[in-house]
Image (tube, grey):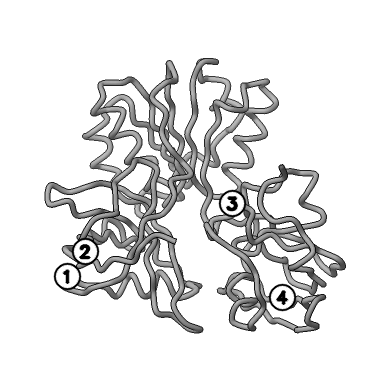
Amino acid sequence: MSALLEATIVATARPCPDVVQIDLLPHGEGIVFEPGGHIDVHLPLEGGVQVRSYSHVAIGPDRSLRIAVRLLPDSRGGSRAMGRLKPGDRIRVSAARNDFPLSFAAPRHAFLAGGIGITPILAQARALKDAGRDFTLHYCVRDRASAPWIAQMQAEFCAAFTLHDDSAQGLLDARAFVGALDPETELYMCGPHPMMAAVKAAWSAAGRVPARLRYESFANSGATDSVPFTVQVAETGAEVAVRRNQSLLDALLMAGQPVMYDCRRGECGLCKVEIEEIRGEIDHRDVFLGDAGRAAALCACVSRLRGGHALIRIDSISHGPHV
């Protein structure tokens, strides 16, 4: 765990109605701006202090760090707490591992973002622009009013920027999008689960090199709306109810169940739990488990049931990647 630092809120803004932009200045060393990187914010929420990760968007001349938060109506508490911050407030932060680093080695770069997934992508695109590299940035939004920084990106990236408005154009044609990319292109992607699943399927169907598709997910990027469900922990017999706006991991921790975890973004696999019995279906929202592992396990930090009940085991499973 990185050392905790205090940070002062320098400025806040609303680039669109349901996104808050926050500039914060960490006190001391340890927070380094990285395109694609995150900062961990430690928030006093229900059940104790909880950690939320937010992508680096920009770094200011005063070394203040810009992040952005989508204000969710079914927030687990994090976005509501972040939305209440005002200049002068102090919060506690720590450095987070960068699991979405930008490589400058690729001959060509393309970026695809959906919704609030623009936050790490914007920082990466700016890094390439500053380095004088060519790239394209494709931004998919539900509608123009719900998306931040559109006019700013149009002015900043000019012909390299393309906006796809679902309300006017329908959903992105993933096969056409992938097919239009040069085979040597390295694609960086962040956005909702359905968009990313479609692009990953199109990438595979086109026979593209897997290592040239890099992506990051976020916890609320499910294929379906979140609904309540219940689990029983095989080792302890504990019955745990998971609310619609609560992760399985948080529910287990609040119930005193000893689950390991780290990234809270469905990327590291440390919090995966074994499914012994299930009544219902799993909504897998992670990017860690492969197809072969998804029938018998889920990542508790982001994935959930589409209602129903499951008997899970938290101690007998090998956590993290297989060696």
The residue shown at (33%, 57%) is 68
Between 68 and 89, the residue placed more toward the observer is 89
User: As shown in the figure, which amino acid type bears the numbered disc 1?
Assistant: Pro
Image-based side of 309 in relation to 155, left or right: right
Tell me whether the residue at label 2 lies in contact with that at label 4, contact meaning CB atoms closer than 8 angstroms. Answer: no
Q: What's the CA distance linking mark 4 and mark 3? A: 24 Å
Circle 2 residue: 12
**N-terminal-most mark, 2 or 4:** 2
For label 2, the crowd category at 10 Å Cα-Cα, with few meaning under 14, some 14 to 19 and many 20 or more, is: some
Which of disc 3 and disc 2 is earlier in sequence?
A: 2
**Residue under circle 1?**
87
Q: Contact, CB < 8 Å: mark 1 with mark 2?
A: yes
Residue assigned mark 3: 268
| Identity, as a three-letter code, of the amino acid under mark 2 | Thr
Query: In front here: 103 or 185?
Result: 103
Q: Position of residue 266 (x, y in %)?
A: 59, 54
Relative vertical location of residue 39 with respect to residue 257 in this rendering, above or below? above
In the figure, is residue 78 to the left or right of 159?
right
What label sits on residue 229 in the rendered view? 4
Callout 4, which amino acid? Phe
Q: Residue at x 35, y 63 (%)?
A: 3
x, y (%) of residue 116? Answer: 42, 52
Where residue 20 sits, quadrant-wise, is bottom left
